[in-house]
């Protein structure tokens, strides 16, 4: 059974930085893609950043160069470095992993809270 262990959330002041990490386990197959999504109260879940097996990345439009995603395939870990955080970045951040074998499957972590406030 695939499991995702997330870490790194917390409280930070506006302009500060946080680093989120997520490690996948439980599958013998290669990970096709990993990413981070977020959900603010009363809003839909949205993509923050994703990276695939070819190291191609995608970022949400709101990122505007502030965040950087990296993927350690050997460790099955994705990290998200978030800089210049704004109060609007507050929310629950969820890790996602996508496999194509044995069949296309997507799994979610339990979420880690990020609060940007003075």
Image (spheres, rainbow, N blue to C red):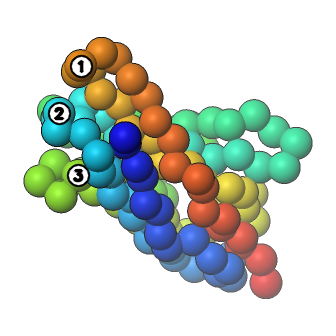
Quadrant of the rendered image containing residue 104: top left
Cα distance between the residues tagged 2 and 1? 8 Å
* SS under mark 2: loop
Give the residue at the far right of this rendering.
42
Query: In the rendered image, is residue 7 in sight?
Result: yes
Which residue is located at x 16 percent, y 49 percent? Answer: 73
Badge 3 is on which residue? 76
Tell me the distance, in whole angstroms, between the alpha carbons under discs 2 and 3. Answer: 11 Å
The kind of secondary structure element at disc 1 is loop
The residue carrying mark 1 is 102
* First along the sequence among labels 2 and 3: 2
Disc 1: CA contacts within 10 A as few (<14), some (14-19) or many (>=20): few
Residue that badge 2 annotates: 29
Asked where in the image residue 46 lies, by quadrant, the reply is top right
For label 2, count other residues whose C-alpha is less than 10 Å away and answer few (under 14), some (14-19) or many (20+): few
Mark sitting on residue 70:
none
């Amino acid at each position: 059974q695939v499991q995702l262990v997330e870490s790194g959330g917390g409280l930070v002041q506006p302009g500060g930085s946080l680093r989120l990490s997520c490690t996948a386990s439980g599958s013998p197959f290669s990970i096709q893609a990993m990413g981070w999504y977020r959900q603010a109260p009363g809003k839909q879940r949205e993509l923050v950043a994703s990276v695939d097996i070819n190291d191609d990345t995608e970022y949400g439009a709101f990122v505007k160069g502030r965040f950087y995603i990296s993927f350690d395939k050997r460790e099955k870990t994705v990290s998200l470095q978030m800089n210049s955080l704004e109060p609007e970045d507050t929310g629950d951040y969820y890790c996602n992993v996508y496999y194509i074998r044995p069949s296309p499957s997507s799994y979610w972590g339990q979420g880690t809270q990020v609060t940007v406030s003075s």
